[in-house]
Amino acid sequence: MDIYSRDTGLRRRNEQLEAQLDTLFQVSQVLSRSLNLKETLAGVLSALHEGGGLERGMVTLADPETGDQQVVAVHGLRTVRTEDIRYGPGEGVVGMVMEAGDSVVLARISEEPRFRGKLGIYDSEGPFVGVPIRVGHGIAGVLAAQPSSDERSHLKDLGRFLEMVANVIGQSVRLSREVEQERQELTDERDQLRRTVRAQYGFDNIIGHTQPMRRVFEQVRQVAKWNTTVLIRGETGTGKELIANAIHYNSPRARGAFIKLNCASLPENLLESELFGHEKGAFTGAMTQKKGRFEQADGGTIFLDEIGEVSAAFQAKLLRVLQEGELERVGGTRTIKIDVRIVAATHRDLEGDVANGKFREDLYYRLNVMPIYLPALRERMEDIPDIARFLAGKLGQQQGRELELTDSALRILMHHDWPGNVRELENCLERAAVMSEDGTIDRDSILLTGIEENVSASRGPTREVDLDDPDLDERERVIAALEQAGWVQAKAARLLGMTPRQIAYRIQTLNIKVRQI
C-alpha cells in the first residue's frame, strides 16, 4: 500500500470516527428530551440514519409477560403497525442476539438462513448488524440496522459503535421502566385511596332503616349529582360531617379537594385569613402569602361546619363568595375567581336567628337552597342496634379484637334518651369496650359507663317479650314481666309463677328500679 492510499484510509477513518462521535452526541440529546420511550427511540434511529449511515434501524424490547421481542421502533417503515410484529424466543437474528447475548454481524443477509425479514425493508444482499440492549445484568432488547454495502470492511467497527448506542439506549429503557413502575404504583395507590375513601364515606357507613333516615339517604343521593348548595341541619352528634362527606365523595367533584372548617373554632380575624387567605405582610406574622380554604377547595367542595356561629360582619364577606364566586385575600387587591361547592351545617335555629337579627336573611336563603334535616337518635330508636353493632365493629378494629354486643346491652341502649346522639353512643360503647376484658359488651359493661337503665313507658306501647326465652337472664325476665304487668308486682309475680314475696325479693336483689304508675 502506497503512502497516498494509507493517508486516504486514515483520513476516511478519522472522518468516520468524527461522524460517529457526532451521531453519539445527537443520540444522547434525543434520549434526554423526553420520557416517551417510543418517541425517543424513533429519534435515535433517525439520528443513526442521518449521521451514522446506518439505515432501516430497528429496536425490539422484551414483553415482560410473554418473553417475546416486540418491535417498538423502526426507521423507514410506515405502512405496518410495529405493535403487530414480534419475535419469539430464539426466532430469527433477533432471537440469536438474545440467546447468545452478543452482537451478530452479517456481511450479507442472504447467507444467514435464520434471518426472517418480517419487516420486509432490508436488502437481502446487504450487510446487517444486531446488538443487545443491556439493562443491568440482563438483556432488554435488540438494536439492529443495515449499513451500506460500502461499509462491509468496517462492520466490526460499526458493531462496536452500535453497542455504544445500545448501552445509552439501555439506560433510557431502565429509566423509562422505573418511571413507568413508579407511575403505576402511584396510580394503584391513588385508585386504592379512592376506593377506600368511597367505602369510608359511602352510604354503607350511614346506618339507618327508619323512615326519617331513608328520606335523608334519598336527598343525599339526589343532591350529590349537582352543584347545589346544601345546608345540613341537626343536633350536635347526629353525623352532619358524615353526610357532607357522602355528598362530596358521591358527586362529580369527588376527584377534587374536600376542605373542612369549623367556623366556631376560630376568632373572626383568624377565620377571615383561614377562609380567604392572606398576602405577605397583610398583618403581623404574615411572613408569606397563603391560600385560604376556599382557594384550596377550588374545583371541589368546602364544608363549613357551625355556620350559624359566624358574626354579622363576617356573614357579609361570606355572602359575596356565595353570590359571585370570587374573593380577595386579606391585604390583597386582586379579585380571585373560584369554583367551589358549598356544604354548610348548623345545629342552631337559623330561622329564629334571622328573626332576631343575628343572622343575615340574604345569607340564610343563599345557604338554605337544599336543606337536609338529620333526625336525633331518640327519633329513630329502631336504628340503635345496627348503629351500635357498626360502632362496635369499628372499635374492635381499633383495638385489634372482636367485640360482641349482648341483647341485654342493646336493651339498655334502646331505653336511653341519648342527648348527645350518635357521638354519645360511640363514646359510651368505647368506655364499655375498655371495661370489657373478654370483648363482650354486656349489660354490666354498659352500666359501668354511667348509663342508667330507663324503662319509662313514655316511648309508647311495651313490646311483648317471651318470658320463656332462654336467652333472657333473670333480671331481664323480671323487668319484662313488670313491664307487661304495668309495674303491678302481684300481676308480674303471677306471670312468672312466683309469689309476691318472691318477686319483691328478686326486685331488691337484682337492683331493679321500680316505676310508679
Image (spheres, grey):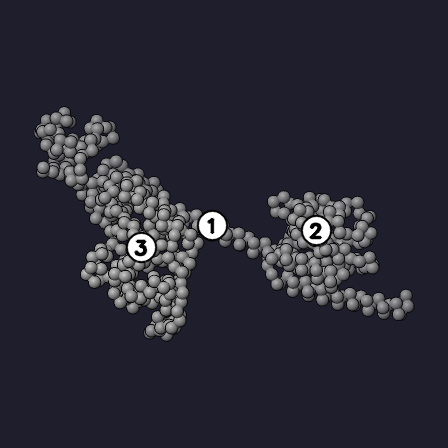
The residue indicated by pointer 3 is: 369
Q: Label 1 vs label 3: CA separation? A: 33 Å
Query: In the figure, residue 478 lies in which quadrant?
Result: top left
Q: Distance between the residues labelled 3 and 2?
A: 60 Å
Question: Does the CB distance between marks 1 and 3 fall below 8 Å?
Answer: no
In the displayed image of the protein, which residue is found farthest to the right? Answer: 2
Q: How crowded is mark 1: few (under 14 residues within 10 Å), some or many (20 or more)?
A: few
Amino acid carrying label 2: it is Thr
At 70% across and 62% down in the image, what residue appears?
A: 47
Q: Mark 3: which amino acid?
A: Val
Look at label 1 and name its amino acid: Asp
The picture places residue 120, in percent across and down from the top left corner, at 75, 49
> Total label count?
3
Residue 156: x and y in percent read 78, 57
Name the mark nearer the viewer: 2 or 1: 2
Q: How crowded is mark 3: few (under 14 residues within 10 Å), some or many (20 or more)?
A: few
Report helix, strand or loop for mark 3.
loop
Badge nearest the viewer, 3 or 2: 3
For mark 2, does the 10 Å Cα neighbourhood hold few (<14), some (14 to 19), or many (20 or more) residues? few
Residue 273 vertical placement versus 480 (above, below): below
Indicate the position of residue 189 as horizontal and vertical percent values: 47, 51
Looking at the image, is 397 positioned above or below residue 510? below
Residue at 72% of width from left, 55% of height from top? 76
Is 283 in front, or is 347? 347
User: Where is mark 1, residue-wise?
Assistant: 191
Q: Name the residue under label 2.
A: 79
Q: Nearer the viewer, residue 213 or 424?
A: 213
Instruction: Quote the CA–CA distance across marks 2 and 1.
Output: 38 Å
Looking at the image, residue 264 sits to the left or right of residue 484; the answer is right
